[in-house]
Amino acid sequence: MDRVLPKSKMYQYCLADIAKGLFNGMIGNYLLYFFQPTSKSGLPNLLPDNKLLGFITVMALITGISKVVDAISDPLVAGMSDKCESKHGRRMPFMRASAIPYAFSVVLIFYVPFRNGSTLNAIWVGFFLITYYIAYTFYFIPRNALIPEIIKDVKMRVNYYGVSTAFFMGSSSFMYAATLFVNMIKNRGISALWAWRIVFSFFGLIGITCLLLSAFAFDEKKYADSNVRPEEKLSESFKIVFKNRNFVYFTLGDLLSGISMAFFQTSMLYYITVLLNVKESQSFLVMLCAIGVALCLFPLVVKWSKKYGKKPMLMAANIIFTVVYCFIFVGDKISALVPGRELFIGLGMGVIVAFPFASINILPQSVVSDIIQSEAIKTKVNREGIFSSVKTFIEKIATAVAMMSVSSVLALGATGSEAVGIMGVKLTGVISAFFSVISLLFLSLYEEKEVLRSIERK
């Protein structure tokens, strides 16, 4: 009989999502803002401003190279984790070894030591960004692979991902408030550069504590002791994964949805400060509004997903996001109609995107866990690591495509010393809407009822 993971240990295991929220926020929300600053930010231009082929920015090149290197590590770590024979289990040893490099590398990205505009700064950022992504892979592929092994009940898994996402989005809300903390520090006479570094270092300390607590939450072998390790080569494991049509359809839909979401999150601070003309010191209110309302909706999202299914919830979320993306293109016109109420419009946007935020953060990983469990029942072999690596790879590709593209798109229409143009900011919304619509087509092909029936027949 399978042992049930106690709730206290489940909550401790979810602490890693606090670190993930903080670190994803630092990279997803602020990396471009920090290294491709506007004149309002007070930040220096730390990287060289030359462009490849006239339009590819240095940041686009850095993120592109780091993601290529990062992608190679995914299947390697997945194969190592699935076949690991450590006395401490297949997954936990990887988490414990990678926690400290993961936390340190994300903070060091922002501590470039050379003169402003130096090429050496670009090399520094590239090196630690690669280190960050590889350490993320070593921590989260094994961690995510362990979830369907230790929580085997489908409905309980939705509850787990609800808690996990609440921790993730709760920490993300603190990361969104970084501008508030930065301004508090700047008001004490500290430069914008060091104000941001102090805030990032503080969040780094919180993150490393949570990562270690999660990695030592329980004895893996006590709760996941009935695994059959795959014997085939890594390439054969991937062939098996991609023969699962439900996994392919859903992951393609999730990939495209992730790209549109990453475009939105990466550009959100620009929407608020450039299009809506909200002060940087108030921008955190819009982000906190979106996160706060989303957290309040978590219980409803979990309840509705059990009643109506995860697929309809995700499709509804994508439809709402598509509409919001289209309105971004005319965001500056809307704010101009009601001068003095720009913050109010921003808060309204935060409320509208709360439901999609909640659904897209809770449900996709739960769907993948359902597919993983269904596949394990069918084949009698546990390949959680390979499936999780593909899921994580998709998340990384989405982020990479967004960050590589957003950096160059944002620069469109920029004049003088500005690194960001209004037209570029507006176009990110159009691109997000395009990917969101294509995502809906693939999500519609996923047969959720078929997957759940195979689990119920066990």
Image (spheres, rainbow, N blue to C red):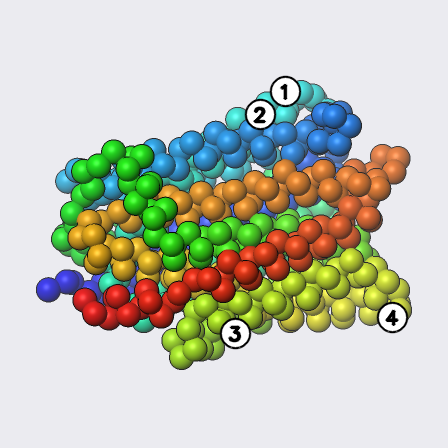
Residue at numbered disc 4: 338
The residue carrying pointer 3 sits among few (fewer than 14), some (14 to 19) or many (20 or more) residues within 10 Å by Cα, namely some
> Amino acid type of disc 2?
Trp
In the figure, 169 relative to 292: above or below? above
Q: CA distance from mark 2 to mark 4?
A: 44 Å
Residue at numbered disc 1: 120
The tag earlier along the polypeptide, 4 or 3, is: 3
Q: CA distance from mark 3 to mark 2?
A: 40 Å
Position in image of residue 424 (x %, y %): 78, 46
Q: Is residue 302 left or right of residue 51?
A: left
Q: Are marks 1 and 3 in contact (CB under 8 Å)?
A: no
* Residue in the picture at 68% in, 66% down: 323
Label 4 element class: loop
Q: Are marks 1 and 2 in contact (CB under 8 Å)?
A: yes
Residue at numbered disc 3: 296
Between circles 4 and 1, the one closer to the viewer is: 4
Quadrant position of residue 52: top right
In the figure, 223 relative to 163: above or below? above
Q: Is residue 34 left or right of residue 344?
A: left
* Residue in the picture at 58% in, 50% down: 259
> Amino acid type of disc 4?
Val
The residue carrying pointer 1 sits among few (fewer than 14), some (14 to 19) or many (20 or more) residues within 10 Å by Cα, namely some
Q: CA distance from mark 4 to mark 1?
A: 46 Å
The tag earlier along the polypeptide, 1 or 3, is: 1
